[in-house]
Amino acid sequence: MSDEPREFHKPLRRPASTFDRAFAAEDPAEVSRVAHVTASALLSRVRSDPEGEVVDRLVAFTDHHGIDTIAELWSRSPARSLPGALWRLYLLQLMIHDDAQTAALLYERGRARLASPDDVVAGAPTPAGPDELTSLIDEILRGVFTGDFAVALDRAASFSRVEAAGATDLADDYDAAEPDRATAFTTRALRLSTYGEDLTACAALWRRDALT
């Protein structure tokens, strides 16, 4: 082993505004096969033996390695599939980690706006500041590997809907004075709302043993 110091490569991070980026593939059939095989193998292996250190590494994966490795495997999978669900969970985590301050603002605005149990299902404390939301999304992702998978998906779906409601509320505030910013928040709201629908559908499929 060489005694020379290795060059440190900072993980590539994606800003929250581009957290739904798609990645190209030369052979869609092969990419789909690899995505489903890797997602199923990873989940089965970890859930059958949820060693704490392994789960910790998976929860902190994007902090240390960025999102590109996961994107190459799962980003082109159908939304209502196992790799598609895992991809969206990691995207939600990355969105919070990258800008927890904005996420906390959206969550509190969404919590006040929504007349639904989504805030309770998601499980955030009151109030939910940046640190609390970061811990919450990590806890949800941890539940994917160590708890009830469908419950973790339902919590992530509810979390997405609360954030979407907050983004819509904030977009309304900016609509007259800063239309570009309003449009950005509206786009985020639509994307998060779609994520909520897809993750809820994935939870239902998992309970029927039909999420592949």
Image (cartoon, rainbow, N blue to C red):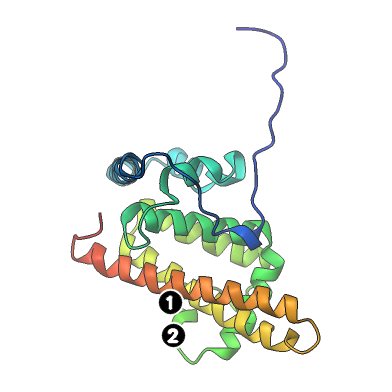
Compared to residue 104, the image places residue 99 above or below, namely above
Q: Name the image quarter holding residue 143.
A: bottom left
Q: Which mark is residue 192?
A: none
The residue at the far bottom in this view is 115
Q: Which mark is residue 121?
A: 1
The quadrant of the picture occupied by the N terminus is: top right
Question: Which residue is at a point 64% across and 69% down the rendered structure image?
Answer: 103
- Residue closest to the eye, 156 or 18: 18
Residue type indicated by callout 1: Val
The quadrant of the picture occupied by the C terminus is: bottom left
Q: Name the image quarter holding residue 157.
A: bottom left
Q: Which residue is mark 2?
A: 117
Question: Which residue is at a point 45% across and 88% down the rendered structure image?
Answer: 116
Compared to residue 179, the image places residue 154 above or below, namely above
Of helix, strand and loop, which one carries label 2? loop
Q: Looking at the image, do the residues carrying marks 1 and 2 touch, with CB atoms under 8 Å apart? A: yes
Q: Residue 186: image x %, image y %?
A: 61, 78
Of helix, strand and loop, which one carries label 1? helix
Q: Residue 66: image x %, image y %?
A: 59, 43
Compared to residue 192, the image places residue 143 above or below, namely above
Question: Which residue is at a point 46% across and 38% down the rendered structure image?
Answer: 53
Q: Is residue 148 visible?
A: no
Residue type indicated by callout 2: Pro
- Residue closest to the eye, 27 or 90: 27
The residue at the far right in this view is 177
